[in-house]
Amino acid sequence: MSFSKKVKEELSKQISTARHCQIAEIAAIISLCGNIIINERNEYFIKIHTENLTVARKYFILIKKSFQVSAEISIRKNVNLKKSKIYTVLIKDSEAALLILKATKLIDINGEIREELSITTNLVVQSSCCKRAFIRGAFLAYGSMSDPAKTYHFEIVTSTKAKASQLQEIIHFFGIDAKIVLRKKYYVVYVKEGSQIVDLLNIMEAHVALMELENVRILKEMRNSINRQVNCETANINKTVTAATKQIEDIQYIKDTIGFGELSEGLEEIAKIRLEQPEASLKELGTLLNPPIGKSGVNHRLRKLSEIADRLREEKER
């Protein structure tokens, strides 16, 4: 089961005890995957289509609990995807449909339904708990999440810019930087920052999925930290090896050109020890001297030898 499906399974079992939150979640589901039918007798019908059984089941339960209305569920095969099924939940009772539309603010005071089916006032999502329920319903209806082990990506697909802007505003209320992108003919509200996706799971009350994502994030951060440390150590080793190679080349050039007899006692001592200990660090070289000296002292002497070697090379070229 994909991570996205796990989240939806968990959310489908999350039934708010407050009726106003149930209505907010119903509003989101109808807004994103529903349509309203008005026949010639001015009768209203609400129909939602979804390929996800959890969405159909959750919507059916919410309608029953909030409005004591029974809906009809039908199933048919998706002609485009042979293995997929489309679930349709239909409310045929016109009075009940009108009651639901008014409660969810998907219809205005004049009984007009806006083409984009976004909520007409903010009353249905006035409190923070209702905003949480609306986001939960929207994600159930048309949301998805990538596997956090691969990448962090949370998105909800909407059919119009009005719906996307409305959803973005509700998510922004919780301090989450949701963005909108036009993908083909759809407007997608998305979040790509890992910690903010964790916050969204908490907002929607998907606590099991939240813990799973947090565990993945911790492992990834540990792995990244170890990789950074290894890369840093590797870079330091390469730097040390490169420096040691240059020092040995300079010392060998001095030995072959003028010999160590022309060097001071301190430079001769470090030159001989460096040739004997080509893999030793500056600190280790310092402990082998008599008397021992620190890293900066060793580095100073080796730099002097490098200057002498460079000067001898220049003189030879002239």
Image (tube, rainbow, N blue to C red):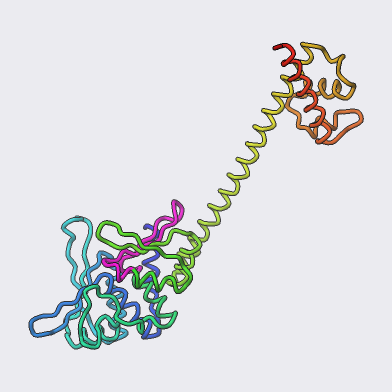
Q: Quadrant of the N terminus?
A: bottom left
Please provide percent x and percent y for residue 284: 80, 32
Q: Give the range drawn in magenta.
A: 139-164
Residue at 25 percent of width and 64 percent of height: 51
Is residue 284 on the magenta stretch? no
Q: In this view, does 147 lie above or below 236?
A: below
Q: Which residue lies furthest to the right in this view?
A: 291
Q: Toward the viewer: 198 or 170?
A: 170
Q: Residue furthest front?
A: 318
Left or right: 68 in relation to 18: left
Please provide percent x and percent y for residue 113: 21, 80
Q: In which quarter of the image is the C terminus?
A: top right
Left or right: 94 in relation to 122: left
Q: Toward the viewer: 87 or 162?
A: 162
Residue at 19 percent of width and 88 percent of height: 95
Is residue 142 on the magenta stretch? yes
Residue at 76 percent of width and 32 percent of height: 281
The image quadrant that residue 303 belongs to is top right
Q: Toward the viewer: 118 or 139?
A: 118
Please provide percent x and percent y for residue 154: 40, 61
Residue at 48 percent of width and 61 percent of height: 212
